[in-house]
Image (cartoon, helix red, strand yellow):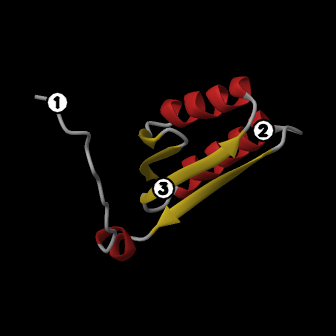
Amino acid sequence: MRGQELLTYVVYDIGDDRVRGRVASACKDYGLERIQYSAFRGSLDTSRRNELATRLADTLGQEIGRILVLPVCERDAQAKRELINEPRAHD
């Protein structure tokens, strides 16, 4: 049994461009959408989330960096607040 899908955030801070690109590719491979330059989100069950975390750990290897894989329950996901300011078009 795979378990319930939860909204999952992946946030990272990695200096090496090549490793950062491979982390982004892994997130996309698992169906996550980019929400910031170094942040993705999407629904994953426990098994897929663990697979992704293992892949990300292997990708980071010994490079300097941090990766956070954060599952969020439905109640907390509904309580989120997203603040967005878009650039204004110039007249």
State the SS at label 2.
helix
Kindly identify which numbered label has been placed on residue 60: 2
Closer to the camera in the image, 22 or 36: 36
The tally of labels here is 3
Of badges 2 and 1, the one in the foreground is 1
Q: Nearer the viewer, residue 63 or 47?
A: 63
- Residue kind at label 3, given as amino acid type: Thr
Residue 15 falls left or right of residue 83:
right
Which quadrant would residue 56 be assigned to in this image? top right
- Where is residue 77, by image quadrant? bottom left
Give the residue at x 50% y 54%: 9
- Residue of label 3: 8
Question: Which numbered mark, 2 or 3, is in the foreground of this view?
Answer: 2
- Residue type pointed to by label 1: His
Q: Compute the Cα span from label 3 to label 1.
A: 36 Å
Is residue 1 visible in the rendered image? The answer is no
Quickly name the residue at label 1: 90
**Image quarter of residue 22:** top right
Q: CA distance from mark 2 to mark 1?
A: 41 Å
Residue type for callout 2 = Leu
Counting from the top left corner in percent of width and height, residue 11 is at 58, 50
Inter-mark Cα distance, 2 to 3: 19 Å
9 or 38: nearer the viewer: 38
Asked if the residue at tag 1 contacts the one at tag 2, i.e. Cβ–Cβ closer than 8 Å, the answer is no
